Amino acid sequence: MKRIVTVCCALIFCITLIAQDKPAYILYDAKGKKIKFEKMIRQLAGKDIVFFGEFHNNPIAHWLQLEVTTALKEKRDLVLGAEMFEQDNQDALDLYLQGKIKAKGLDSMARLWKNYPTDYAPLVNFAKDNHLSFAATNIPRRYASMVAKGGFAALDTISTKEKSWMAPLPIAYDPELPGYKKMLEMMGGHSGENLPKAQAIKDATMAYFILKYFKKGSLFIHYNGSYHSDNYEGIGWYIRKAKPELKQATITTVSQKELGSLLAENIGKADYIICVAENMTTTY
């Protein structure tokens, strides 16, 4: 019997070593130092707004979004919000959170992303189960598309009702922000001059509705593509212009072939960096 127990313990030890040798992700701080999940949670609990930057199809990021949210709920009152819900779908989202419509009703009334069932439904259901507000923060896609084609002037033609689904116009816009400049460079300069403006109207709108739903004394967790909050730009830039006193923190997701140390290009992208194996399976 003792021999069996010894063998079992050895097997468990070996399995543990193997698991540690092939981690799915490693968590780093802004300086590129490894940090424990629990320490990150303690630090995040002292903030007003947390931006969780994801790769939209990365299962590790989506799993950690729920883990981070669950852990912070034990320490703070929360308000949630996401890029993945457009503001004109807020009523449908509220009806679902209030239990007045089922999941099928939400699917028919709102424009849900194709990976909603696997990646975002757990967050929405967490809000529903815990009676939390969940803000649909993004501008409806069709208006961002209008800006991408015709600049901010394209929004002069829409109705007052439609303008209520976005940040008040005109929005502040700094084309010299590195993220917007990089986007312009990727599009070959002048031919894509309106693309950063489309990004800006999204960033400004998400910031506007984060502040609209923000409750003093609560912690707002916002889920968005990492590009909207990397390098402390995007949404955070608009938040700082409107409410510089609010304490922000950012999380981002990056992928690397080797996880043992953070590449120089990824250091400083956010306060906390989830480094995921580049061959990680995706949700779509």
Image: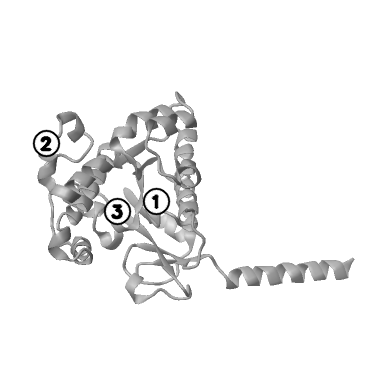
State which tag comes first along the sequence, 2 or 1: 1
The reply, left or right, for residue 281 in relation to residue 141 is right
For the residue pair 91 and 27, the one nearer the viewer reads as: 91
Above or below 200: residue 166: above
Circle 2 crowding by C-alpha within 10 Å: few under 14, some 14–19, many from 20: few
Residue pictured at 21% horizontal, 63% vertical: 187
Q: Position of residue 154 (x, y in %)?
A: 12, 43
* Amino acid identity at mark 1: Ala
For label 1, the residue is 45
* Amino acid identity at mark 3: Gln
For the residue pair 157 and 2, the one nearer the viewer reads as: 157
Mark linked to residue 279: none
- What is the spatial separation of the Cα atoms under label 1 and label 3, in whole angstroms? 11 Å
Q: Position of residue 37 (x, y in %)?
A: 48, 60
Circle 1 crowding by C-alpha within 10 Å: few under 14, some 14–19, many from 20: many
In this view, the residue farthest toward the top is 100
**Does dot 1 land on a helix, a strand or a loop?**
loop
* Amino acid identity at mark 2: Thr
For label 2, the residue is 157
In the rendered image, which quarter contains the N terminus? bottom right
State which tag comes first along the sequence, 1 or 3: 1
